[in-house]
Image (cartoon, helix red, strand yellow):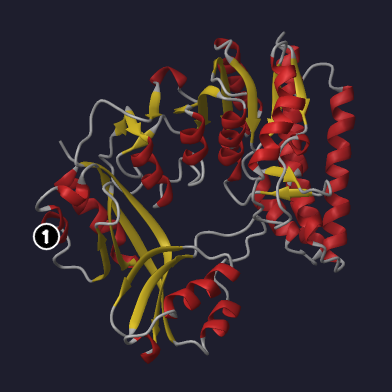
Amino acid sequence: MNNQNTSLTVAKFGGTSVANFEAINRCVDIIEADPKVRLVVVSAAAGVTNRLVELSAGQTDLARRQALLHDIAAIEYAMLDRLENRSQVAAELDALLALMASLSGRIAAGDGEPALADQLLSLGERCSTLLLTELLNQRGIAAVNFDACQVMRTDDHFGRASPQLAQLESLCEQHLLPQLATQVVVTQGFIGADQQGRVTTLGRGGSDYSAALLAQSLRARVLAIWTDVDGIYSCDPRVVADAHPIAELSFNEAAEMATFGSKILHPATILPAVRGGCQVFVGSTYAPQKGGTWIRSECGSQPVFRALSLRRRQTLLTAHSLNMLHAQGFLAELFAVLARHRISVDLITTSEVSVALTLDQTGSDSSGRALVSQALLDELAPLCRVEVEQDLALVAVIGNHIAKTSGIGIRVLEAMQDSNVRMFCQGASAHNLCFLVDGDEAESIVQRLHRQLLTE
């Protein structure tokens, strides 16, 4: 599959887009309106994954466990009950819900096999694809429910598995591509399988990533991300009331926004789209007529200031060691420890005897376990003296030519002259300027910056 498939659009629908019967009907309307949509990637219905996460953590209180299972069943049955001729689908849904109860019971009883948690977490997506596929068929659109585990091959790092790209592309060509010519294929986001066939998950928010990987492997022309907002905004509208929608973004800008806190796209989504030469569209299933945001390799406008992103729950880790002074290898040792704990670093500054870096505590695996653990800090202790500050916030100013435009730092710092900035980073990227502030001040800082930099 070396040539781009210009007739193929991959559509991904998030949890709010499949939350109830009215919502999945809107999904079918969108699929029906665009004959190029041949592959549909679906999340679990809103509210289901959070409950499955609690169950997968080993909820031992029987009453609580039963309540969680009841809530999930109520969400799924509310959609099932609106379908016609639902007897066969009802049996399949009952089997999935029974498996949820069985797996959650085994985990609560102390079965600590990591694969069980991922198998349990995968069932939310399986329920969604079952119901959406049936509704498509009942609306006269030929559709098939396809198991993503057939093609999404990953390693065995349960909870945050890494896809094996070469195998994914080969398996897509073998198992998935032939089915797209005659029908709409509905499959699960977020999940895959390791070499032994055990179910794995890609981490929270992994459905976007799944869709982008599949779009890349199939050489799709467009990846359409359908959610509950009509595109990407200049800032989170819940933080900045006068934030405005952005009609077009470059891949570089979108990647910075996703990495530094925008919740519309999973941070890993952009890279597969770039590799596959695939345009990305972000729109709302609730108001598709409003259009949305197009993300392309190049776009017409390249303003210095495009958007602001805010990411909370940041940890600042400062490592002090006299071994750094005129020495080699300290940073290599430090980052080797971080790598063993699968921790990535966002920002870093150094002095002669210390290094300060930010660790993102909003990241977690599918089971909700924090990526920054006490075990990490314990392993760092013999290497250096460690100081940890928590409840900070990372603010990113995103745009173009930032590193080469005079006066950028002054304009940003003037907006924060009454605030305490814990770290300030500029120069590593032409598309962002980042700084770390106290979490309590973050919203007011972002509001001031938006007013001074982005309000027309």
Horizontal placement of 265 versus 441: left or right? right
Horizontal placement of 107 versus 225: left or right? right
Horizontal placement of 114 versus 371: left or right? right
Tell me the residue at 39%/71% (across/down).
Answer: 357
Note whether 412 is above or below 378 in the view shown. Answer: above
Locate the N terminus and report the quarter of the image it occupies.
top right
Q: In the orientation shown, which residue stands out farthest toward the top?
A: 140
Instruction: From the top left corner, tell me how far across and down residue 198 is, in percent.
Output: 82, 49
Query: According to the image, label 1 marks what residue?
Result: 414
Q: Quadrant of residue 232?
A: top left
Q: Quadrant of residue 212?
A: top right
Instruction: From the top left corner, tell me how far across and down residue 245 is, in percent.
Output: 32, 32
Instruction: From the top left corner, tell me how far across and down residue 230 is, in percent.
Output: 41, 29
* Amino acid identity at mark 1: Glu
- Where disc 1 sits, the SS reads helix
The residue nearer to you, when weighing 445 against 410, is 410
